[in-house]
Image (tube, helix red, strand yellow):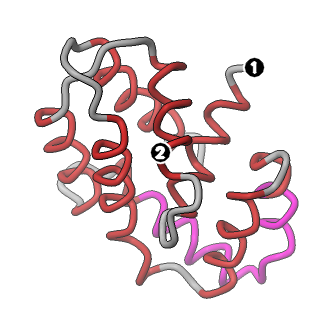
Amino acid sequence: MKKILPLLALTLAIAACNSGKDKYPEMAQSMCDCFNKIKDSLPPSAMKLFEKAAVAPSAKETYESGAKELSPEDLQRMMSALLQVSKPGSAVSDCLSEMDKKYKTAGTQKEATAKMIDALKGSAGCEMMITMMRMQQEKGK
């Protein structure tokens, strides 16, 4: 998890440092689609955890406490799947790299994160991405 949040921050920083028109909703959905490439590798208990954390008052606290309740096997499967995000050449990593090339946005990383979270609120199937971005946002407070 410690490798994933910095990668997410880097992806958002690259997007935020570039100039261009506001494409946050489309960019947020693209990032969601990238992260969903590992969905099939996640156990159902991990997906429930992301769903719960995505709407919790504190995504970070909910995720961390929920992760402790997962079975060792499910926790291992979840962590292995999440590590694919930072693995060069993985489907998720390649997708995020392509996304960085495609989107150019104005604003800071903090602004980009907030706008993307707003764009994804209520989006079914993007709970993992919402949780990750909210945890990044809470980390910056």
Residue at horizontal 44%, vertical 37%? Answer: 8
The label on residue 141 is 1
Does the magenta stretch mainly form a helix, a strand or a loop? helix
Q: Which residue is mark 2?
A: 119
Q: Quadrant of the C terminus?
A: top right
Q: Secondary structure at mark 1?
A: loop
The label on residue 110 is none
Q: Secondary structure at mark 2?
A: helix
Judge left or right: residue 45 versus residue 93.
Answer: right
| Above-or-below relation of 21 to 131 | above
Amino acid marked by disc 2: Ala
Residue at horizontal 31%, vertical 52%? Answer: 87
The picture quadrant where one finds residue 133 is top right
For label 2, count other residues whose C-alpha is less than 10 Å away and answer few (under 14), some (14-19) or many (20+).
some
Residue at horizontal 66%, vertical 82%? Answer: 74
Whole-percent x, y for residue 44 in the image: 62, 87
Real-space CA distance between mark 2 and mark 1, rounded to the nearest whole angstrom:
20 Å
The picture quadrant where one finds residue 110 is top right
The picture quadrant where one finds residue 138 is top right
| Above-or-below relation of 136 to 45 | above
Judge left or right: residue 104 versus residue 14.
Answer: left
Amino acid marked by disc 1: Lys
Indicate yes or no whether the magenta region holds residue 80.
yes
Of the image marks 2 and 1, the number of the one nearer the N terminus: 2
Judge left or right: residue 98 versus residue 44.
Answer: left
Residue range (magenta):
63-83
For label 1, count other residues whose C-alpha is less than 10 Å away and answer few (under 14), some (14-19) or many (20+).
few
The answer to whether marks 2 and 1 mark residues whose Cβ atoms lie closer than 8 Å is no
